[in-house]
Each structure stands twice: as C-alpha cells, then as structure tokens.
Image: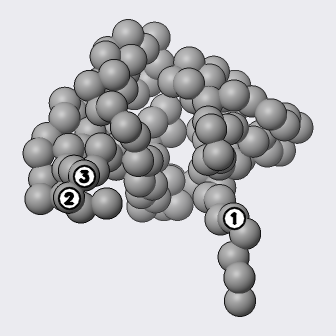
Amino acid sequence: MKVDDIRVFIPSKDYELSKSFYQALGFNLTFESSEVSELVNGECSFLLQNFYQVGVTSNLMIQLSVLDIEQVHSKLQSLSEFNIRFKPPKNKAWGKVIYLWGPSGELWHITEFFSSYS
C-alpha cells in the first residue's frame, strides 16, 4: 500500500464560527458545502464537518506541526473573539507544544519539534 494523503474530519458545534476561526488562524477555505469544508495551509489540510457530537469532539486530538511556535502563540492571543482556550508553549522532550481547544472543544497539540527529534 502506498499512501498519498491522510486527513482528519473535525466536527463543529457552530460550523460558521469554526470556519471563521480556522481561516483567522491561517488556513485557506478551498472547498465549502453545507456539510463539509476543506481547509488548507501549505501541503496540509483537514475537513471541517457540519456535525457535532460531544463524545466524538471531546475525545479528538490532532497534532499540528509548525516551524515557529511563538508566532502561533501570538496569533492565538489575538483571536479572543472565538470560543477557544489554550495554554502557552510548554517544553517537552521532543519540542515545544501549545494545547489548543478549538471552538467545539477539539484538542490540538500544536508542536514545534526540536531539530534533533525530527
């Protein structure tokens, strides 16, 4: 088997709010329907669903690898109009990580890997 791509479907409690949040965070909306939208940054993308179930969302974790975690932290601090919460960058054995709970409660591990780890 040769894999070409893998993408996660992220549920949204408020579909319009979530689309706006991810665009403000830096993702481009490349496809949109009433049921699902594709959001892209560089060569990475995910699908945002117009679907919400607390059990699914509260158990969802996604890792987002970035090159500059301080830039992401500054960006998150400027997005106070969205229903998000996050913890400042924290050092781990593999790099620095920000824990971000998105508008629907989905948990992102935003990670800048140390060069020795990647």
Decide if residue 92 is on the left or right side of residue 75.
left
**Is there any visible trace of residue 4 in the rendered image?**
yes
Q: Quadrant of residue 21?
A: top right
Residue at 11% x, 45% y is 91
Q: Nearer the viewer, residue 30 or 33?
A: 30
User: At numbered mark 1, what does the secondary structure look like: helix, strand or loop?
Assistant: loop
* Vertical position of residue 34 compared to residue 74: above or below: below
Q: Which residue position is annotated with label 1? A: 5
Q: Earlier in the sequence, mark 3 or mark 1?
A: 1
* Vertical position of residue 45 compared to residue 25: above or below: below
| Front label number (3 vs 1) | 3
For the residue marked with disc 2, what is the amino acid?
A: Ser
For the residue marked with disc 3, what is the amino acid?
A: Ser
Circle on res. 116: 2
* Vertical position of residue 79 compared to residue 48: above or below: above
Q: Residue furthest bottom?
A: 1
Q: Which residue position is annotated with label 3? A: 115
Across and down, in percent, residue 24 comes to: 56, 18
Across and down, in percent, residue 30 comes to: 80, 34
For the residue marked with disc 1, what is the amino acid?
A: Asp
In the rendered image, the quadrant that contains the N terminus is: bottom right
Q: CA distance from mark 3 to mark 1?
A: 24 Å
| CB-based contact (under 8 Å), mark 3 and mark 2 | yes
**Is there any visible trace of residue 21 in the rendered image?**
no
